[in-house]
Image (cartoon, rainbow, N blue to C red):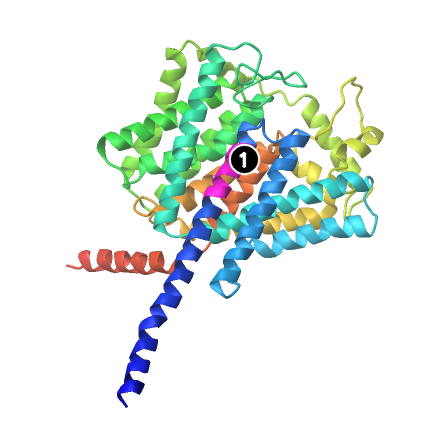
Amino acid sequence: MQLSSFVIVDTTAEAPQTVLPQKGAQRIFQNVLVVGLFVLLAFGILAFGAVDEWSTFTFEAGAAILFLVWVAEQVVSGQVTLSKNPLYVPGALFFTLILAQILLRTTAYSYITRYEATRYLSYGIVMLVAAECVRGEELRKKVGMGVLAFGTFYAFFALAQELAPNGKIFWLYTPRYHGSIYGSYVNHNHYAGLMEMLIPVPLCLSMGHLFKGGKRAMIAFAVVLMASTVFLAKSRGGMIAFLLQLAMLAALTLWQKRDRRIAIGLLTVCVSVLSFLFFIGRGQVLGRLGDLDPGIRFKMTTDCLRMFLHHPIAGSGLGTFPTVYPRDRTFFTTLFINQAHNDYAQLLVETGLLGFLLMLWFLVRLYQRATPTSRRWEFKWEAALSLAALLGCTGILFHSFVDFNLHIPANAALFYALAGLAASEHSPSSSRSHRKAVKAEAVGSLP
C-alpha cells in the first residue's frame, strides 16, 4: 500500500516536468518565428525592395524556412492550431485562382505566372506567421518597439543620403536601372509606400497613453522625422496617403468619442512636419502637391479597362501585364512599360473579375475585423498595433491607385504582414484583461 502510494505521488510529480519542457520549446519556436519574420521583412527593405533575382530568391527561401519552423512548432505543441482569421479564405481562393491559370493554361505567359505564384505563396506565409505568432501584449510590444526603432533609423539614413547624395544607394551601390533614389529604393514612390506602412506605429504610440513624458516626445519626433522624409521624397501619392492616414485616425477618434487631445496632437504633427521641411530648406517640395496632372498614368488605366474585356472572367494571367499590354496601348513611347501604375487596374487585367472580387472580399473582411479590435488602442499594445497596421494598410491601398507598390516584394510582404496583424484574433489573456478594464470603467462611471 505504501509502495502504491509512493508510485502515485511520484507519477503526479513528474507530470509537470513532461509538460513544462514542451511549453518551453513551443515558446522558443514562437520567438524564433517572430524574430525571423522581422529579419525577413527588414532584409527585403534593405535589399533594394527585394526586386533583384538574388534578393527575391533569398526572400522566398526565408519565407519557406519560416513556414517549416511554424510546422515544427505545431508538431511540438501536439496539435495544429489555426486562428479564425477572416483573411485566410479569400487569400486561399486567390491562390487557387492563380494555380487554375497555370494548370488550365489560360495565362498568356506560363513561366511568369508560375514565378509570381511562388512570390504570392511567400506573401501568404508572411501573413500566416504574423497573424498566428504576433499575439499577446508582450509580443506585440516587442514588435511595436522593433518597428519604431527600425523606422526611425531607416528614415535617418534616408535623410542623410538625401542631404549628401552621390547617386548610389548606401553611397556604395549603383542601381542597374536609373531612377529617383530614396533610401534603399530606386524609386522614391516605393520609399514613400514603405513609410506609409511604418509611420502609423509611432503615430499611434505618440497619441496614446502607453508612454508618457519624454518617451512620448521622442516617439512624436520619430513621427515627424519619418513623415518628413515622405515629403522630401517628393512622392505626391505618399504625401496624400499620409494626410489621409491622419484624417482617418482623427475620424476614428471622433467616432469613438476619444479625448480631443488626440486631434490636437495630430494637428501638431502636421505643423511640425511642415516646420521641419522649411527648417532644412526644402519647403519647395510641397509644390509637388499642386502638380497632379495624371498624364500617362490615366491613359494606362483606360487601356487596362480595354484589356480587361479580352479576358473578363479569369484574366490574362498573373504577372502578364507587360506581355499583353503592347497590343492595347493607345499612345507612343520608347519606354518599356512593365507595370500599370495602378495596382487595381492591373489586378483586373491579370486575374479578371474573379480575382478582383476576391480582392474586394479580402479588403472588406480586413476592415470588418480590424476596426472593432482596434478599440482602446490608447491603453493596450494589441489594440494599438492593430490600429497602426490598419492605418498602414489604408495608406498603401490608397497609394496603389497611382503606383505599383504592391508589386515591390518588400512592400507587398509588409502589407500582408500588417493585414495579418490587423485581422488577427487577440489572445485570450488580453481579451480577459480588456473585459476587466471595460467593467472597471463601467463601475467607475456609476454615481
Residue 218 visible in rendering? yes
Q: Nearer the viewer, residue 285 or 198?
A: 198
Quarter of the view holding residue 11: bottom left
| Disc 1: CA contacts within 10 A as few (<14), some (14-19) or many (>=20) | many
The kind of secondary structure element at disc 1 is helix
Looking at the picture, how far across and down is residue 418, in whole percent? 50, 43
* Image quarter hosting the C terminus: bottom left
In this view, 86 is above or below 139: below
Q: Principal SS element in the magenta part?
A: helix
Which residue lies most toward the front here?
A: 3
Looking at the picture, how far across and down is residue 133, in whole percent? 46, 51
Q: Amino acid at mark 1?
A: Ile
In this view, 322 is above or below 441: above
Q: Which residues are magenta?
A: 35-43
On screen, residue 103 versus residue 250, left or right, reads right
The residue that appears at 82% across and 52% down in the rendered structure is: 104
In this view, 80 is above or below 41: below
The residue that appears at 49% across and 14% down in the rendered structure is: 162
Q: Mark 1 = which residue?
A: 396
